[in-house]
Image (spheres, grey):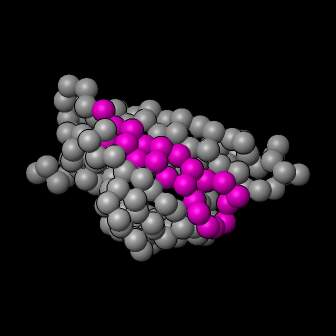
């Protein structure tokens, strides 16, 4: 099953502000053009359920995910519970390093097409990694903008 990690350093911003933007799912369409909509349907303490509609390389992807947040540790694990992929899960980790924030993201996915996996998985890894890279940059830019 394909897995990728992405580490990004966001300059001159606080981890708490990045965390606030990262957790503000329903505003993602405002900061990320590929995100069509996000709706949080349940929120019980650290456990959230949300519905997503995203464009990925011209294709509309839809899923419902369960996220478990740990604000003190600035970690968020998520997993698709229903949707277009067979498997889609990952974890966000934020760490303050001086004036900068290091964002670590790990994603594991499977489109559920074993006969085509050899062809699809490498391209999908690049697409997802690039898409999440743009999301991280958008979250960082929004966190900086909110700081004034």
Between 33 and 104, the one lying in front of the other is: 104
Which residue is at 66% across, 54% downward? 87
Question: Would you say 93 lies left or right of 132 here?
Answer: left
Which residue is at 46% across, 48% downward? 77
Question: Would you say 105 lies left or right of 148 here?
Answer: right
User: Can you name the residue that lies furthest to the left here?
Assistant: 148
* Residue 57 on the magenta span: no
Between 123 and 53, the one lying in front of the other is: 53
- Vertical relation: 23 (above or below) 27: above
- Vertical relation: 82 (above or below) 18: below
Q: Which residues are magenta?
A: 74-95
Q: Quadrant of the N terminus?
A: top right
Which residue is at 40% across, 71% downward? 42
Residue 26 in view here: yes
| Position in image of residue 143 (x %, y %) | 23, 50
- Vertical relation: 66 (above or below) 1: below
Number of numbered discs overlaid on the protein picture? 0
* Residue 93 on the magenta span: yes
Q: Quadrant of residue 46?
A: bottom left
Q: Main secondary structure of the magenta part?
A: strand
| Position in image of residue 61 (x %, y %) | 60, 67
Question: Would you say 70 lies left or right of 33 here?
Answer: left
Which residue is at 77% across, 56% downward? 112
User: Can you name the residue that lies furthest to the top here?
Assistant: 98
| Position in image of residue 114 (x %, y %) | 84, 51
Question: Would you say 67 lies left or right of 27 here?
Answer: right
| Position in image of residue 96 (x %, y %) | 25, 31
User: Can you name the residue that lies furthest to the front here?
Assistant: 44
């Amino acid at each position: 099953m394909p897995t990728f990690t992405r580490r990004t350093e966001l300059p001159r911003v606080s981890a708490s502000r990045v965390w606030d933007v990262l957790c503000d799912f329903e505003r993602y369409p405002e900061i990320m053009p590929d995100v069509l909509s996000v709706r949080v349907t349940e929120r019980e303490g650290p456990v959230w359920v949300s519905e997503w509609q995203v464009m990925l390389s011209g294709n509309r992807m839809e899923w419902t995910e369960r996220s478990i947040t740990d604000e003190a540790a600035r970690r968020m694990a998520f997993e698709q519970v229903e949707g277009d992929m067979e498997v889609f899960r990952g974890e966000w980790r934020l760490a303050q390093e001086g004036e900068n924030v290091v964002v670590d993201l790990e994603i594991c996915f499977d489109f559920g097409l074993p006969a085509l996996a050899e062809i699809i998985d490498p391209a999908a890894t690049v697409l997802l990694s690039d898409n999440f890279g743009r999301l991280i940059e958008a979250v960082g830019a929004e966190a900086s903008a909110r700081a004034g």
